[in-house]
């Protein structure tokens, strides 16, 4: 495991701990206990906020896979209907759980994952393809055909 990957894993654990109810950043709870607390919270929300069918559109495979794993970790069963896009995920879940736990946790975990993937991608491009991996220059108007910048 690379130091970057270890750092990402640590960051993901801290975000999970935050949403599982950890009091301080330095606290480390056992994974089982954290998941149990969140599942208990899901159960409590389900008693006062019955599950409804919700649709989530996740634009890329990394975000979708993260969301699927997070949902399954909490005992939810993601699905999609025949002919729905692969980017669509359906869940039967209390809306309060989505608003208070699942979606905020997903957003923070996804932001950390996207940042990590971008850093790795840029490093590989700079080291293996070309040192300049910056965006294309913006020009005021189109150049005439056959003229290079």
Image (cartoon, grey):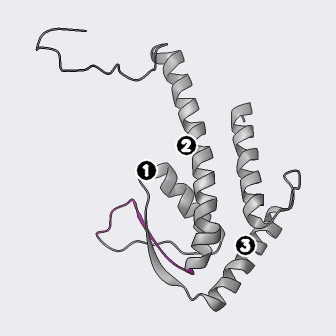
Residue positioned most to the left: 145
Which SS class for mark 2? Answer: helix
Extreme residue toward the front, this view = 140
Q: CA distance from mark 1 to mark 3?
A: 26 Å
Neighbours of disc 1 within 10 Å: few (<14), some (14-19), many (20+): few
Residue drawn at x 60%, y 78% as measured from the top left = 96
Which residue is identified by label 3? 38
Q: Which residues are magenta?
A: 83-94
Image height check: is 113 above or below 124? below
Taking the image as drawn, is residue 16 in sight? yes
In three-dimensional space, the C-alpha distance between marks 1 and 2, rounded to whole angstroms, equals 10 Å
Q: Using residue 7 as the reference point, say whether residue 131 is left or right of it.
A: left
Q: Residues within 10 Å of mark 2 (few under 14, many from 20)?
A: some
Q: Is residue 47 left or right of residue 21?
A: left
Reading the image, the residue beneath label 2 is: 114
x and y, in percent, of residue 124 in the image: 53, 23
Q: Check disc 3: other Cα within 10 Å, few if <14, some if 14-19, many if 20+.
A: many
């Amino acid at each position: 495991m690379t130091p970057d990957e270890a750092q990402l894993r640590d960051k993901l654990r801290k975000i999970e701990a935050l949403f599982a109810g950890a009091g301080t950043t330095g606290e480390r709870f056992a994974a089982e206990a954290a998941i149990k607390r969140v599942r208990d919270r899901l159960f409590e929300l389900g008693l006062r906020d019955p599950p409804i069918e919700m649709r989530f559109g996740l634009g890329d495979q990394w975000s979708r896979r993260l969301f699927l794993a997070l949902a399954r970790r909490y005992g939810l069963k993601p699905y999609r209907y025949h002919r729905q896009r692969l980017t669509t995920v359906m869940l039967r879940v209390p809306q309060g759980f989505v608003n208070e736990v699942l979606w905020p946790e997903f957003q923070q975990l996804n932001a950390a994952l996207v940042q990590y993937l971008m850093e790795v991608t840029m490093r590989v491009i700079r080291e293996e393809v070309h040192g300049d991996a910056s965006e294309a220059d913006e020009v005021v108007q189109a150049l005439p055909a056959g003229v290079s910048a």
